[in-house]
Image: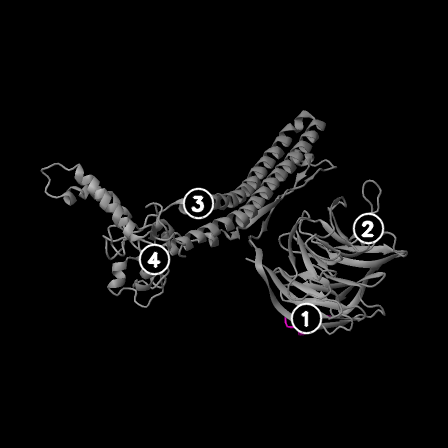
């Protein structure tokens, strides 16, 4: 970019000024001097620094500077320099302030020259002498200052990316591992405390047996805590490496040394994957109630601990611009009522007044069909850990097994409205309302057994009225759409209200939440039919992003695939749109 230069003063004025200076100096020259001009050579040395290198006139000041060609220019020579220059590239010209600049590398072919240009094809800097000798002819050439800025900008972006995405994710996992170590240590200590109490209850002659058990506990604890500590170290080391990289990148950014910029290689990919870690399932202590022959066994039996390997994962971030992967017609008469992803590339869906449920792929091709036996169309559906389809009618929870509909259980005096499969094996969360639609509740089932109900807060206030949509987050929070109050309520696994979300003032119309889903980052996605958009909030209720692209029309039901792709089922149009909003 050429900075706008001030208009160059009249050269004649410069000449008059120089003549006056010459006359003044000549008066002070001794009688033995041969020429006043020869005596002024030292005086002109300081002014040579500001001369225009293009016209090379002694009386013209080079108030502009071309960083690409390392030339000082007067205002009149800027345009001529660009037109006549043999360097067909960007000329970085600005007002000359000082000679301070980044340290230009020495040309590899001409050691006496500093590099002024950069060849994108050869990926090397070079000097103007190389260009005059025919090197890099017809290549993609740019000024070295421009390349300096590009490289510096890339390092800055990498650094910001590491700070924004990598560090928080690694810190989160390190923190989780610290909690696991504390919990594991605490559980082992609890077992040891129980063991000590048993030792007090028994006579002194049992102390030897107790000691044997405590030693075994200590060994197991040290082994398991060592496993967790190593896992923590596997997370701490790359986290420290990221911080070191950020520090080094900032040093490079603040450096004026082009060689350091040129030699920089991005290390973002090295830190993208969280390494696999282990979790410890601590043993339980079973106290014997009958006397046995061996003294150690009289005290009780200590079970073995088990190590659960938790797979690593790739850190995902929001795309700058979401992408539409697919659009197809569901062919339901009144649009899509419920849609639930099955793995990464398929989804089950049902309509408002259709007893037919079908599984489709990304192209809308039907993979499987199921016609329910009841006269009532499915109200809601979910997919359990065994990849079985579970659906509700008004009063029963049903499952599809080997293509046949089977009733799991029915409820009395309540109308079923929503269901989701829990992350815990063989557990379901079911939302229901009373017959008058004045009270609602969430019930957790294990098989057909009721584990607990969430209906009121600790003060006895009703939490739900019409829980038509619900899902469970990765942190075991239960997210519920309360349609009558036009808000989303999130309670923890024990039913304590954590927060409510009532929309955001960035949208125009009143917030009207419908279906919701969660993704791998524990983000909560909410379909807003009033504003035809999808709200994305984090696990604590803070707005992260709003997706309002792709002409969404009445998004009623949504689901997130295993690959974090968003499936949106529209109401009246009956269209299904698949959106990629996250990327690794």
Task: Please provide percent x and percent y for residue 429.
Answer: 76, 54
Task: Please provide percent x and percent y for residue 71.
Answer: 30, 53
Dot 3: element = helix
> Is mark 1 in CB contact (under 8 Å) with mark 3?
no
Mark carried by residue 464? 2
Mark carried by residue 250? 3
Task: Please provide percent x and percent y for residue 344.
Answer: 62, 64
> Looking at the image, how many numbered discs can be counted on the residues?
4
Q: Is residue 12 visible?
A: yes
Placement of 513 over or under 490, stated as above or below: below
Mark carried by residue 78? 4
Q: Is residue 386 visible?
A: no
Report the magenta residues as a range. 358-366
Q: Earlier in the sequence, mark 1 or mark 4?
A: 4
Q: Earlier in the sequence, mark 2 or mark 1?
A: 1
> Is mark 2 in CB contact (under 8 Å) with mark 1?
no
Instruction: Estimate how packed mark 1 is, as few (under 14), some (14 to 19) or many (20 or more) residues with alpha carbons within 10 Å.
Output: some
């Amino acid at each position: 970019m050429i900075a706008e230069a001030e208009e160059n003063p009249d050269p004649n004025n410069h000449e008059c000024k120089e003549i006056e200076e010459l006359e003044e100096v000549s008066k002070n020259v001794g009688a033995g001097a041969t020429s006043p001009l020869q005596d002024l050579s030292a005086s002109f040395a300081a002014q040579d620094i500001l001369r225009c290198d293009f016209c090379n006139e002694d009386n013209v000041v080079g108030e502009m500077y071309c960083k690409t060609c390392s030339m000082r220019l007067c205002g009149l020579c800027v345009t001529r320099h660009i037109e006549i220059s043999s360097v067909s590239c960007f000329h970085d010209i600005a007002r000359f302030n000082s000679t301070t600049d980044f340290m230009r590398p020495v040309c590899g072919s001409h050691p006496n020259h500093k590099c002024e240009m950069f060849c994108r094809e050869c990926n090397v800097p070079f000097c103007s002498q190389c260009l005059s000798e025919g090197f890099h002819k017809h290549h993609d050439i740019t000024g070295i200052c421009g390349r300096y800025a590009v490289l510096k900008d890339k390092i800055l972006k990498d650094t910001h990316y590491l700070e924004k995405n990598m560090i928080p994710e690694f810190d989160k996992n390190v923190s989780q591992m610290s909690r696991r170590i504390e919990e594991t240590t605490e559980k082992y200590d609890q077992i040891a405390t129980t063991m000590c109490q048993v030792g007090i209850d028994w006579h002194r002659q049992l102390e030897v047996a107790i000691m044997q058990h405590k030693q075994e506990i200590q060994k197991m604890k040290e082994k398991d805590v060592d496993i967790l500590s190593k896992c923590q170290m596997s997370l701490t080391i790359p986290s420290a490496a990221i911080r070191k990289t950020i520090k080094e990148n900032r040093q490079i950014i603040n450096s004026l040394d082009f060689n350091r910029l040129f030699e920089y290689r991005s290390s973002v990919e090295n830190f993208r994957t969280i390494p696999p870690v282990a979790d410890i399932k601590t043993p339980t202590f079973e106290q014997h109630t009958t006397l046995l022959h061996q003294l150690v066994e009289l005290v009780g039996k200590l079970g073995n601990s088990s190590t659960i390997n938790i797979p690593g994962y790739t850190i995902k971030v929001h795309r700058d611009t979401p992408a539409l992967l697919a659009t197809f017609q569901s062919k339901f008469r009144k649009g899509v009522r419920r849609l639930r992803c099955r793995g990464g590339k398929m989804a089950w869906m049902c309509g408002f007044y259709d007893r037919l449920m079908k599984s489709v792929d990304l192209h809308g091709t039907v993979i499987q069909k199921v016609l329910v036996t009841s006269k009532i169309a499915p109200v809601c559906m979910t997919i359990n850990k065994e990849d079985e389809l579970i659906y509700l009618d008004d009063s029963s929870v049903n499952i599809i097994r080997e293509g046949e509909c089977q009733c799991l259980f029915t409820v009395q005096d309540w109308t079923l409205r929503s269901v989701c499969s829990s992350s815990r094996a063989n557990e379901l969360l079911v939302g229901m309302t009373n017959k008058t639609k004045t009270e609602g509740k969430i019930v957790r089932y294990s098989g057909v057994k009721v584990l607990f109900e969430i209906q009121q807060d600790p003060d006895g206030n009703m939490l739900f009225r019409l829980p038509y949509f619900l899902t469970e987050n990765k942190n075991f929070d239960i997210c519920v759409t309360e349609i009558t109050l036009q808000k989303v309520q999130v309670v923890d696994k024990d039913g304590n209200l954590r927060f409510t979300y009532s929309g955001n003032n960035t949208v125009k119309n009143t917030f009207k939440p419908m279906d919701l889903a969660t993704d791998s980052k524990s983000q909560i996605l909410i379909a807003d039919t009033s504003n035809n958009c999808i709200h994305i909030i984090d696990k604590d209720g803070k707005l992260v992003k709003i997706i309002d692209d792709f002409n969404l029309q009445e998004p009623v039901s949504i689901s997130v695939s295993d690959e974090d792709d968003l499936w949106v089922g529209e109401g009246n149009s009956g269209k299904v749109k698949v959106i990629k909003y996250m990327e690794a």
